[in-house]
Structures are given as C-alpha cells and as structure tokens.
Amino acid sequence: MHSKRRYHHGSLKQALIDASLELLAEGGPSALTLTEAARRAGVSPAAPYRHFAGRDALMSELARHGFETFGARIEAAWSEGRPDAQSAMRAMCAAYLKFARDEPGLYAAMFGQAATLADPGAGGAADHALEILWRAVVAWLQQAGAPAQGARYAALQIWAAAHGVAMLTISGHFDSVKTADSALILDAAAQGIMEGAVARAKEAKT
C-alpha cells in the first residue's frame, strides 16, 4: 500500500501529477480519478480542484507531459539524422516502441482520446512530436534525391504503423520470443512506407 506523500507549499499540482502517473503505471487510464490522485498525494478530495477543473483537465495535463517526454526521446534518437536518415529513422522507431513499453499507462492516456489534445498545451506537444517525424521523413526523401512532396502523408503512415505496433506490443500480442520482434516489424513497415514515398515523389518530379 502506498503511504500518503507530503507535498511542500506550492507543489500541490506536481504532487497530483506524480500521483496520477503512478496510477496510470499501475492500472492505466481507468485507474485514474481525481479522488484517488488526491488520496495518493495525501490531500483532501477537494484539493485537486485548485488546479484542475475535472478529470479531463488532469488528463490533458498528463498528455502534455507525456508528449513532451515522448517528443524529447524520439528527437534525441533521431539525432539530426545522423549517421544517415535511414539509420536515424530506425533509432527513432525503436525509441517510440521503448517509450510505449516503458510507459504503457501514460501512452494509453496520451492516445486514448483525441479530445484530450484540445488543450493548447497538450495539442501543441503532440503536434511537435509529429513534426519531428515529419522532419525525419523530409530528410530521408532528400537523401534519396526525391522532393519532399507527400512527406506529411508518409509521416502519418509511419505514425499509424508505429502506434499499431506499439499497442499490439504493450497488450502482449507481439512477443519477440514467442511471436514476432516488434522492432523488426516496425522497421519493415517504415522502410516500405518510405520506399513508396520516394518512388511517388520521384515519379511526380518527372
């Protein structure tokens, strides 16, 4: 059983966020309520309303936190396209899957409902993460000698593939020992998407 944590003056919001992240890690989004977050933080049930209008507002704040952390990790893995765009994309896809495996509850909260991203902070953090992927696609096309036409569409395809593989992985459908290596599956999907994007861009150029 978790003991109630003490929070210092002025840090109630962070204490509630920390408690909420624990709840997400333990039971996913369904385990998160304002009442339980307050209990875990060691404050009264009314205390969260000083910072959050309701559960949706708390979920938006958690999504913002999640997308900022997620974006930082995939951007670091991308490493400005070093040593080349294809290798860097592979590293970025691996970082995507690692985040989902390490933070399954938070990942589910981030992507569970698009309405969560209506908040400018959460939505902006999500857009930034997608922009990193878009920049990676542009770099791959440029290194292949193709124009950046269709880069956003290819980025959305890779995002969809990565999300699908991530969800199948964290739900236990993909097992590197028993069934399939999720990293290899995502690598192959990204490679196929980019080969198609390069071919289409070159065809449109002629």
Image: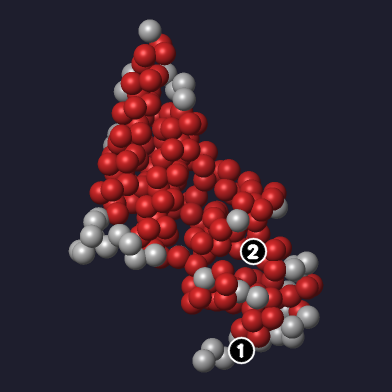
Q: Residue furthest top?
A: 206
In this view, 58 is above or below 138: below
Give the quadrant of residue 116: bottom right
Residue at left 64%, top 78%?
Answer: 37
**SS class of the residue under badge 1?**
loop
Local crowd size for mark 1, using a 10 Å CA cut-off: few (<14), some (14–19), many (≥20): few
For marks 1 and 2, give the CA distance: 21 Å
Local crowd size for mark 2, using a 10 Å CA cut-off: few (<14), some (14–19), many (≥20): many
Residue 136 position within the rendered picture, expressed as x and y whole percent measured from the top left: 42, 35
Left/right of residue 200 with respect to residue 1 in the rendered view: left
**SS class of the residue under badge 2?**
helix
Residue 58 position within the rendered picture, expressed as x and y whole percent measured from the top left: 68, 66
Give the quadrant of residue 170: bottom left
Q: Amino acid at mark 1?
A: Lys
Residue 200 tag number: none
Left/right of residue 86 with respect to residue 158 in the rendered view: left
- Taking the image as drawn, is residue 69 in sight? yes
By what rule are the colours in the image chosen?
secondary structure
- Taking the image as drawn, is residue 76 in sight? no
Residue indicated by mark 1: 4
Q: Amino acid at mark 2?
A: Met
**Image quadrant occupied by the C terminus:** top left
Residue 8 position within the rendered picture, expressed as x and y whole percent measured from the top left: 68, 80
- Whether tag 1 and tag 2 are in contact, CB under 8 A, the answer is no
Residue 59 tag number: 2
Residue at left 54%, top 89%?
Answer: 2
Residue 92 position within the rendered picture, expressed as x and y whole percent measured from the top left: 37, 46
Residue at left 62%, top 71%?
Answer: 17
